[in-house]
Structures are given as structure tokens and as C-alpha cells.
Amino acid sequence: MPREKAVRSVPSERNELEEQPVLRRLCGPDMANGNLYDNRRIVEKYLNHKLSKNGHAREFHRCRASSLDDQEEREKESARRVTLHMALREAGDELESLYRPELAEMVKGLRATSVGTEQPRFAAVADELFRDGVNWGRVVAFFEFGAMVCVQCAPDAERNACAENVARWMAEYLNGPLNGWIQENGGWDAFVELYTRKKDSVFSSSWPSLTTSVFSLAALGAVGLTIGAYLTQK
């Protein structure tokens, strides 16, 4: 699937951002995009969850603010956002429990790439994942792949920079190649509704296991298709 240039979102509340220049500088122009959901924020929440699960505390520089700002942000966090974060976490955790060795093997190959080629290689993996089309299952696999890259960043001293880079690459991909499909298929609310409706059947079913010992790009696409069979009709 051809990659498109990432679309830079435009703040919808310019006055509020102008009154908070420090927050604007730290969080960047894509913090508020006029929609309920900010893809960069969704990515950061997901990566934070995965890093914390693996004993790596992480706070992204882009949206690091004072404790007062953090409290105000939490108060503004809507129930819909919280529900989305939880749905993504649960779906990703389930995928991880089934395919962690294969994901880890694939990430090792990404880490072995030459310096300066990490982003093109990451994008190539994403392109292969969505080569035969997009569905919510493959979107979850995309999140889990990015999280695994962050978790396996070595040495630890490089993990912060790695997490920042991966968060940016993922947000750019969501705002670019995947943005049209997400909007045309009901947005993130549609994922939450579909996941909630089919959650019981998904987790009570036996997902087919991979037959390959190495999680190649083709195998990654197969995982997306397997999950997609439960999560979407497309």
C-alpha cells in the first residue's frame, strides 16, 4: 500500500494554545486537532502502558507539563477516550500473549538495520502489514509492533530516544496512510463499539497459531488477518 505524506493537524482552539506557549512548545502542533481523539496522544498512552508493564517508566517530552497541568488534563479526559485506551490495551495485550515470541523475533530484525534506516524500515513493516487492506485487527497489530520496538530498545540509555521516535513514526502513519480509512470506517468510536460487541466471542475463541518459527513480514500480515476476522468485516 503506498504511503502518503503525514497530515499535520491544525489546532482548533488557537486562543487557548496562544495562552499556553510552553505547553504548545512541548506538545507540538498536533496535540489538538479539532477532534475528540489525538492520534499522537493515543500512541503515547499505549506505549506508556506497554513500557510500564515491562518495568520501564516513561513520560513523553511532547506532553510533559506541570503537575497542575497534568491534573487539569486528567479532569478533561473524557470517558470515551478512557474507553478507547482500555480497549486498545486489552486487544494489544491479548495479541501479545499469543504472539510475543514472533513479535520479538521480528523486532530483532528491525534493530539490526543500519543507522538512519530505522524509520524507512519501520514504515516498510507497516506497509507490509496493510498491504492487502486495512482492518481494525491490523491496526491493533500495528500498535503492538511499535510497542515491542520500544520495549526491546537496547541499551536502556537509548530507550527514551527510541520511544520518542517510535511514537512520532506511529502518529505520522496514523495521520497519513491510515487516516482516511479510520475516518471512513467510523473513527476510533467505531473500533470501541466493534471491540466491545465482539469482545466475548474473541476471547473465548481459539485464535489460530502461526505455523512459522520466524515472524516475517508476511506472518505479520497473517496475524492482522487473523485478528481482523474477529474485529472487522473488511
Image (cartoon, rainbow, N blue to C red):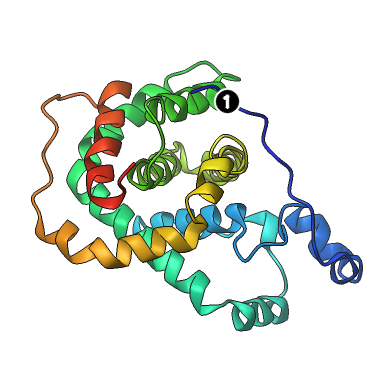
Quadrant (top left/top right/bottom left/bottom right) for the C terminus: top left
Residue appearing at x 29%, y 51% in the figure:
231
Name the side, left or right, on which 48 lies relative to 208.
right
Q: Looking at this view, is 77 or 21 the one in front?
A: 77
User: x%, y% of residue 18?
Assistant: 91, 66
Q: Is residue 43 above or below residue 133?
A: below
User: x%, y% of residue 105?
Assistant: 27, 29
Instruction: Tell me the residue that label 1 is attached to.
Output: 3
Query: What's the residue type where badge 1 is placed?
Result: Arg
Dividing the picture into quadrants, the one containing residue 94 is: bottom left
Q: Is residue 134 above or below residue 195?
A: above
Name the side, left or right, on which 86 lies relative to 119.
left
Q: Looking at this view, is 42 or 5 the one in front?
A: 5
Q: Secondary structure at mark 1?
A: loop
Residue appearing at x 40%, y 31% in the figure:
133
User: x%, y% of residue 67?
Assistant: 68, 78
**How many residues crowd around disc 1 within 10 Å: few (fewer than 14), some, or many (20 or more)?**
few
Name the side, left or right, on which 221 lies relative to 149.
left
Dividing the picture into quadrants, the one containing residue 51 is: bottom left
Q: Residue furthest top?
A: 114
Q: Looking at this view, is 157 or 97 the one in front?
A: 97
Residue appearing at x 59%, y 58% in the figure:
41
Please indicate, yes or no, whether residue 141 appears anywhere in the rendered image: yes
Please indicate, yes or no, whether residue 216 appears anywhere in the rendered image: no
Label tally: 1
Residue appearing at x 26%, y 48% in the figure:
96
Q: Is residue 30 above or below residue 120?
A: below
User: x%, y% of residue 92?
Assistant: 32, 53
Q: Is residue 224 above or below residue 22?
A: above
Q: Looking at this view, is 99 or 10 the one in front?
A: 10
